[in-house]
Image: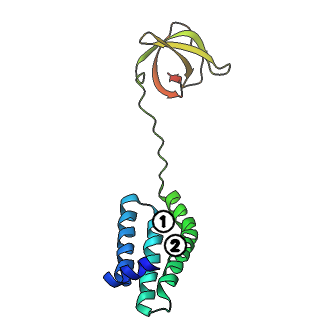
Amino acid sequence: MYYLAIIKDVVSMDIIWLGVAALAYILKMITKHYVFACIAVAALICAFCVFAEVENRPLYELIIFVVATIALSFFIQPYVLRKKLEETEVVRIIPDFPQKNKEATVIERIDNTIPTGRVTVDGEEFVARSATGGAMEVGEHLRVVDCDGHILICI
């Protein structure tokens, strides 16, 4: 309490609470963390208590600040988390694979009913499937049109 009395003589408590609110708001803008918004609102509530001239102010202000920060954090957290989930955009990135539109040579018969088949593209071997569903014999020249994971789809 002694330190609060010294601070009170130099600067009024309403200015201190408004400064805490401003600092917390700036930190909230920098870090994007909602807890700083709760601290800023709690500090504004304490500044209002100073203006309302509540009895035994320093102790009550500190209690109000702690309780308000915890309560606001508790009640705002579900809203903030729901908002973040709504704003999160799920982006599925499928890179353009280098074998697309290249010529492939069948080295193992492609048959989608048995799931077998291998092709070579630029000297590399790949598992392959037929885009049309029909069988393709060894030695046929195909074109790669798509991929499904590591499996090339050819026509």
| Residue 65, image x, y percentages | 50, 77
Quickly name the residue at label 1.
Answer: 35
Tell me if 143 is positioned left or right of 15 in this view.
right
Q: Residue at x 55, y 25 (%)?
A: 132
Q: Residue at x 43, y 27 (%)?
A: 97
Dot 1 crowding, Cα within 10 Å, few <14, some 14–19, many 20+: many
Q: CA distance from mark 1 to mark 2?
A: 8 Å
Is the C-beta separation of discs 1 and 2 under 8 Å? yes
User: Tag 1, which secondary structure?
Assistant: helix
User: Tag 2, which secondary structure?
Assistant: helix
| Residue 43, image x, y percentages | 43, 77
Farthest-out residue, right: 114
The quarter of the picture where residue 2 lies is: bottom left
Q: Residue at x 35, y 75 (%)?
A: 19
* Res. 11 in view: no
Question: Residue 69, labelled with which disc?
Answer: 2
